[in-house]
């Protein structure tokens, strides 16, 4: 029995979550976002299981090329576009689509000599102020690309929300209004909604939705968990007990003696730590699941181990401990750490074994 961390990836849950996307945005095509190793879930394996999506989105060229090398033939969109005109021949050869978000990219495409035209998604900065053409430059960029033989007809129009996770914030409606104003009269499919837009702002669905986090069973909305939207957790991070320790009242545990027993108790040492991607800064009392019950982490998380207070419960070395996933939402752990679920999922290190379960 391996006494090391394992990330169990539930393929059936992944497919279920794609079905939920279809139900929520029935009139839209689905660009499934697989960047950052599919949010830590394994990019190629996830792509192989999401063949019912209409296209895949990645951040960078190397991610797209890895999917192509792995046999993925479905349309792939480079969400950060390209960084140098020298990449354009490779983009054409690999049949990739690109997001164009700055004037330099527009100019590079117009000036290039390419063997075939490229599918372009033209991005407007409606308020995120990260990537995207300023609204007042958008129509001119669209016009230049529409007249270029290097761009396929039917340029797709897109933007990205800054605050869609907060349903009380007016910024999302303002972004939609700004996009409608400055894209008025331009043809082409529209794509605005990420996971938060898809679940929280149905008027933003448009022709294409771009789910990322919700595909993996996690809520993108503030104060919500995936189960609130009918989603199922895809990753369950677990490890095993490697030792049981008796601790007397007044004794301390771990580096810095950061926790002191108030009464005699028993601790279970679990084989997982920040070297595996579990966050070092979880506070005392952060829950784990053992035998289906919650037990608190005590003391500091170290590189390879953490300790939990099991009291007088019957626990033995080899027993499985769930850190997040089925029965313990990753959203809850992220909130205790003061971060977001994205970071926890993406931080899993190669020391963790990935096991894919379910599916056909």
Image: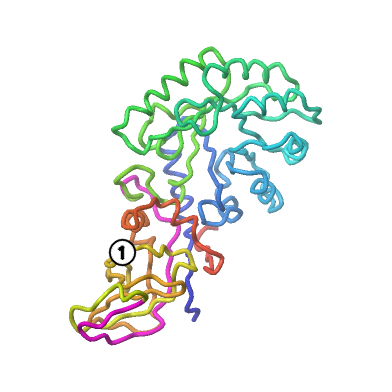
Q: Position of residue 112 (x, y in %)?
A: 78, 27
Q: Is residue 42 left or right of residue 27?
A: right
Residue 188 higher or lower than 318, as above or below:
above
**Secondary structure of the residue carrying numbered label 1:** loop
- The picture quadrant where one finds residue 101 is top right
Q: Along the line of sight, which residue is nearer the eye, 322 or 54?
A: 322
Q: Residue furthest top?
A: 185
**Residue pictured at 48% horizontal, 41% vertical:** 211
- The picture quadrant where one finds residue 305 is bottom left
- Residue at mark 1: 283
Q: Residue furthest left?
A: 263
Residue 253 higher or lower than 187, as above or below:
below
Q: Along the line of sight, which residue is nearer the eye, 201 or 36?
A: 36
Q: Along the line of sight, which residue is nearer the eye, 207 or 80?
A: 80
Residue 284 higher or lower than 47, as above or below:
below
User: What is the total number of numbered labels drawn onto the structure image?
Assistant: 1
Is 236 a magenta residue? yes
**Residue pictured at 55% horizontal, 42% vertical:** 53
**Residue pictured at 52% horizontal, 37% vertical:** 30
Report crowding for label 1: few under 14, some 14 to 19, many 20 or more residues within 10 A (C-alpha): some
Quadrant containing the C terminus is bottom right
Residue 138 higher or lower than 22, as above or below:
above
Is 339 a magenta residue? no
Q: Position of residue 357 (x, y in %)?
A: 50, 63
Q: Position of residue 92 (x, y in %)?
A: 75, 36
Range shown magenta: 228-254
Here the colouring is: rainbow
Q: Position of residue 98 (x, y in %)?
A: 64, 34
**Residue pictured at 54% horizontal, 32% vertical:** 131
């Amino acid at each position: 029995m391996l006494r090391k961390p394992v990330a169990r990836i539930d393929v059936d849950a992944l497919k279920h979550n794609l079905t939920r996307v279809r139900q929520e945005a029935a009139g839209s095509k689905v660009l499934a976002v697989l960047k950052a190793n599919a949010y830590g879930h394994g990019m190629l394996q996830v792509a192989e299981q999401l063949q019912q999506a209409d296209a895949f989105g990645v951040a960078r060229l190397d991610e797209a090329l890895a999917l192509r090398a792995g046999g993925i033939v479905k349309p792939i969109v480079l969400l950060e576009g390209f960084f140098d005109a020298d990449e354009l021949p490779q983009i054409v050869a690999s049949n990739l689509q690109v997001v164009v978000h700055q004037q330099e990219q527009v100019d590079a495409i117009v000036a290039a000599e390419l063997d075939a035209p490229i599918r372009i998604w033209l991005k407007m900065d409606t308020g995120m102020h990260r990537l995207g053409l300023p609204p007042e430059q958008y129509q001119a960029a669209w016009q230049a690309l529409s007249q270029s033989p290097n761009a396929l007809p039917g340029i797709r129009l897109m933007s990205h929300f800054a605050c869609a996770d907060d349903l009380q914030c007016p910024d999302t409606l303002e972004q939609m209004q700004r996009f409608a104003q400055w894209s008025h009269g331009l043809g082409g499919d529209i794509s605005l909604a990420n996971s938060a837009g898809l679940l929280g702002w149905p008027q933003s669905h448009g022709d294409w939705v771009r789910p990322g986090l919700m595909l993996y069973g996690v809520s993108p909305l503030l104060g919500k968990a995936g189960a609130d939207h009918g989603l199922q957790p895809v990753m369950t991070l677990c490890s095993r007990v490697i030792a049981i320790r008796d601790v007397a009242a007044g004794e301390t545990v771990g580096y810095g003696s950061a926790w002191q027993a108030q009464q005699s108790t028993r601790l279970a040492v679990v084989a997982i730590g920040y070297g595996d991607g579990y966050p070092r800064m979880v506070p005392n009392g952060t829950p784990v699941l053992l035998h289906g019950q919650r037990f608190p982490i005590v003391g500091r998380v170290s590189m390879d181990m953490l300790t939990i207070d099991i009291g007088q419960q019957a626990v033995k070395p080899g027993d499985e401990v769930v850190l997040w996933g089925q029965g313990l939402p990753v959203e809850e752990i992220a909130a205790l750490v003061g971060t977001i679920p994205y970071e926890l999922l993406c931080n899993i290190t190669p020391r963790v074994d990935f096991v894919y379960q379910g599916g056909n």
